Image (cartoon, rainbow, N blue to C red):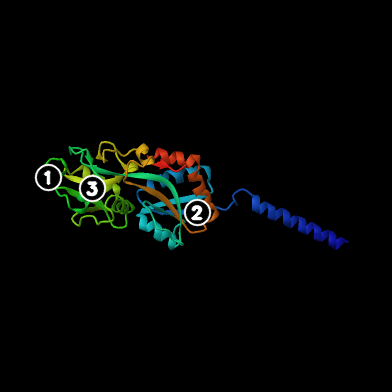
Amino acid sequence: MKSKYKLSIIICITLIIAGYMIFAPGTEKHQNIAIAGSTSVQPSAEKLSEKFMEENPLTKITVQGGGSSTGLNSVKKKTAQIGTYSTKLKEDSKVKQTKIASDGITIIVNPSNKVTDLTKEQVKGIFTGEITDWSQVGGTPGKINVVSREDGSGTRDAVTKVALDDKDIVKTAIIQSSTGSLMQTVSSDPNAIGYASLSDLRENEVKTLSINKVPATKETIKDGSYVIQRPFLFLTSPNPDTSTQQFIDWVLGPEGQKIIEDEGLVPVN
């Protein structure tokens, strides 16, 4: 009887210690989420991550750019839990796609340019090199200097697909590796033309053109009347881990979608 009593005592003590180890302060498991990809999605991803970490201090989220192709490859190579992608993506069994927002891609020129509107066909002609002088589209005579993002950029890919009917951007285009440097180039060249996400625009630095007489606004993107637009996507493995899925669910919820809207994007919910 005594041995059974002692054994019971030992078991009770063991269970108490185990319970303390599980629930004691400071022993909760920290979660890490790495996000990489589109530089257009990056600012919004950073704002979303900051707010989520405030509310979930045990979760650490890091956000990096690199371009949409980096986002896709990072998920496939399992170097990031979430890849950000800023154009339509074909179905791929190795990745799960979640649309978090819609974005308009604006055609931008120097503020001194007197052109205010282009047709979609004129945009196509300019960026493919068929139209080479501003006088051909109602502007002051002068050689058009096309400024573009690099290969692998989701923004470039979206422009090529949506505005250029999958034709290549003219080979003489000035190539910039970020939206910020592209806008800076356009702002310093009276004859330049480029493109940028509506959410990336900086006040008074560049001028946006309407397309087919329709300006790029949240309303025209939402109703589809502004034709140059794209989705912002989160890419994950087909079965993301619990913490990653919790973050994505939060992004799609009221608080996350409010941040999306505040960033100049069109929310999905």
Q: Is residue 231 left or right of residue 129?
A: right
The residue where tag 2 is placed is 32
Q: Secondary structure at mark 3?
A: helix
Determine which of the numbered discs, if any, sits on residue 223 in the image.
none
The residue where tag 3 is placed is 121
Please rate how many residues cluster around mark 2, counting C-alpha atoms within 10 Å: few if below 14, some from 14 to 19, many from 20: some
Image quadrant where residue 152 sits: bottom left
**Residue 240 in picture, x, y percent from top left:** 51, 56
Q: Earlier in the sequence, mark 1 or mark 2?
A: 2
Q: Nearer the viewer, residue 233 or 167?
A: 167
Q: Amino acid at mark 2?
A: Asn
Q: Is residue 46 left or right of residue 189?
A: right
Please rate how many residues cluster around mark 1, counting C-alpha atoms within 10 Å: few if below 14, some from 14 to 19, many from 20: some
Q: Residue furthest right?
A: 1
The residue where tag 1 is placed is 142
Tell me, yes or no, if residue 108 can be seen here.
Answer: yes
